[in-house]
Amino acid sequence: MINILMTGAGAPGGPGIIKCLKDVPNSKLIVGDCDDKASGKFLNDSFVLLPKAKDFNFINKVLSICKDMEIDVIFPLVTMELFKFSKNRDVFEKNNIKIIVSDFHNLSIANNKSSLYKHLAKKGVSTPMFRVVNNYEEFYKAKEEIKAATSSYCLKPSISNGSRGVRLVNDEINEFDLLFNEKPNSLYISDEKINAILKDNSFPELLIAEILPGNEYTIDTIVDNTGNPILILPRIRTKTNGGISVAGKFEKNTKIIDYCDKIIRSLKLSGPIGIQVKEDKFGEFKILEINPRIQGTSVAALGAGVNLPKLAVESFLGIEYAIPEIKWNTEFIRYYDELFF
C-alpha cells in the first residue's frame, strides 16, 4: 500500500487531481491544505491540515505529519512549496519519504522567467526576443529596442505567480473598449501608462519581451528521474478564465512536441512539468513560461485517455507503467461545481 499526500487540496485544479490520484493502484490518498475548508477536504476520505508554505517551520511540521501518517510520497500542487521541498528532499528521503519535485538548481532556473530565457538562448533553443532589466533606465532602453523590432512588447516579473505583474503594452489599444467591454482584469496597458508607473517606483527584475500574436498552447509533460520526457501532450487553449484553461483541444502537433522535448532535456527537470508556448508572427512556437509542477487543467487529459497524475506517481516511484493510446483531437470544457457540508 502506497500512502500519497497531495498538498494544495483547495487549489483550482485540486478536485480533478484528487480524482486522478485515486486511480493509483494499491494506494491510499491523503489530501492536505492550510485551509480547513479547502474543497478537496470534502472530496476525499482523508484530510490533514498543513502549515502555510511561508511558515518558518514548514518543513519540520510537514515531516512530522508525514511520519505520523506513514506517508510514502508527497505530490505537491502549491508553487511556493516546491522550493522548500526541493531544498530538503534528502531530509524526507532519510525517512523513506519521496517528493515529486525537481532538484533545486534546475527548479530555480525553470521558475525564473529571465533565467529560463537566458538558459534556453545559451542552449540554442529559440525564445521570444527579450531583455532583462532591473531599473527604469534599463527598462526604457530595452522596451524601445523591442518596440523598434515588433511595435509592441510585454513585461513580466522574473518570478511571479499567476498573471501578477504581467502586462501587454500596445499603443493601439482602445481604452474606451477596455473600459466598457472588458473585465477589469485585462492585461493590456498603454506605453505611456506603464512608463509613468515604473519611472517613479522601484520594481523587481523584469523580463521585457516581444508579444507573440498566434495561438497559445499548454503542454502537459511527464519527465523521468533522469530528465527525459515520458510523455508530451499539447493542448490548444481556446478559452481561459483568470489565466486557467476552461476549454481546449488536444492536438498532435509535432513541431510543439519536438520543441518541448528540447526544452525539457536542456533543463533536467523531473515529474509533471507544464509548459506554455505561443506562435510568433511567422508561425514558429516559442516559450512563454514553465510551470515546474502538475498543472490544474491536467485532469482534462482523462478525456484523451491519459491519467497524468497517476503516470507521474508510477514513473517517479519506479512502478511499472504503460503509456496509454492518446485520443488526439479530443476537445474539453470545464465548469464550476458546488460542495455542501
Image (spheres, rainbow, N blue to C red):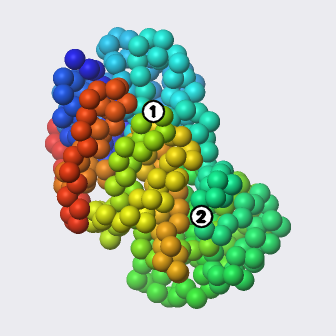
Is residue 325 shown above or below 258?
A: above
Specify whether 282 is left or right of 136: left
Task: Categorize mark 2 by other alpha carbons within 10 Å: few (<14), some (14-19), many (20+).
Answer: some
* Residue 196 image position (x, y, % from top left): 73, 73
Total number of numbered discs in the rendering: 2
Q: Is residue 86 left or right of residue 257?
A: right
User: Residue 225 got which mark?
Assistant: 1
Image quadrant holding the N terminus, namely: top left
Residue at the (53%, 62%) spot, across then down: 287
Please state which of residues 175 and 286 is positioned toward the viewer in this rendering. Answer: 286
Which residue in the structure is indicated by mark 2? 126
SS under mark 1? loop
Q: Residue at x 56, y 44 (%)?
A: 267
Q: Residue at x 69, y 54 (%)?
A: 122
Q: Secondary structure at mark 2?
A: loop
Q: Give me the C-alpha separation between circle 2 and circle 1.
A: 25 Å
Query: Which is nearer the N-term, disc 2 or disc 1?
Result: 2
Residue 335 visible (yes or no): no
Q: Give the x, y percent position of residue 183.
A: 41, 73
Along the viewing direction, whichever of 58 and 304 lies nearer the viewer: 304
